[in-house]
Image (tube, helix red, strand yellow):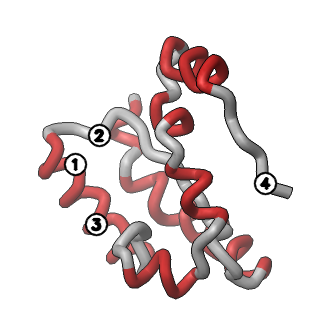
Amino acid sequence: MDAVVSEDKKAEWRAKGFSFYASGVVEQFRTMTYEQVLDAGLAFVGTPAEVIEHINAMDQQIGGLHEFVIMSHLGDMEHWRAIRTQELFAKHVIPAFAPLLS
């Protein structure tokens, strides 16, 4: 089932600081396969150390990340891979940024 988000709802999200969700990016991911997401460079993929490097590079490029969103179930990705991604992210990636969050 495809959900179409109204412009009023998007405006509400923007007003509350959730511009990412109002941007339509999530809807784009719903129509893409896992391979398409990778080919388009829309995901940080690799070991926890590689993902940390990607996030640090993005932080430097934009002058400071204030938040990021993990979307671990992209396209037609197998469910077990999404769960494993969340586990690795929680165990290794988030702690690498704990000093920035305190």
Mark 1 and mark 4 lie on one chain; the one further toward the N terminus is 4
| Residue 76, horizontal then vertical, whole percent | 70, 80
Q: Above or below — where is 74 with respect to 96?
A: below
Which residue is labeled 3 in the image? 54
Image quarter of the C terminus: top left
Q: Amino acid at mark 3?
A: His
- SS class of the residue under badge 1? helix
Q: Earlier in the sequence, mark 2 or mark 1?
A: 1
Which residue is nearer to you in this view: 53 or 99? 53
**Is 93 left or right of 13, judged from the image as shown?**
left
Q: Evaluate if marks 2 and 3 touch, with contact meaning CB atoms under 8 Å apart.
A: no
Counting from the top left corner in percent of width and height, residue 53 is at 26, 67
Q: Of the residues tagged 3 and 4, which is closer to the observer?
A: 4
Question: Of the residues under marks 2 and 3, which one precedes in the sequence?
Answer: 3
- For label 1, the residue is 59
Side of 55 relative to 67 (left or right): left
Q: Is residue 16 above or below residue 2?
A: above
Mark found first going from the N terminus, 2 or 4: 4
N-term mark: 3 or 4: 4
Residue beneath label 2, please?
Answer: 65
Reading the chain from its start, which is encountered first: label 3 or label 1? 3
Tell me if 33 is positioned left or right of 54 in this view. Answer: right
- Cβ atoms under marks 2 and 1 closer than 8 Å: yes
Q: Classify mark 3: residues with Cα within 10 Å, few (<14), some (14-19) or many (20+).
A: some
Alpha carbon distance from label 1 to label 4: 33 Å
Would residue 101 be visible to someone looking at this image? Answer: yes
Disc 2 from disc 4: Cα separation = 30 Å
Between disc 1 and disc 4, the foreground one is: 4
User: Separation of disc 3 and disc 4 at Cα?
Assistant: 31 Å
User: In the picture provided, is 72 more to the left or to the right than 44?
Assistant: right
Q: Mark yes or no: residue 90 visible.
A: no
Give the residue type at disc 1.
Asp
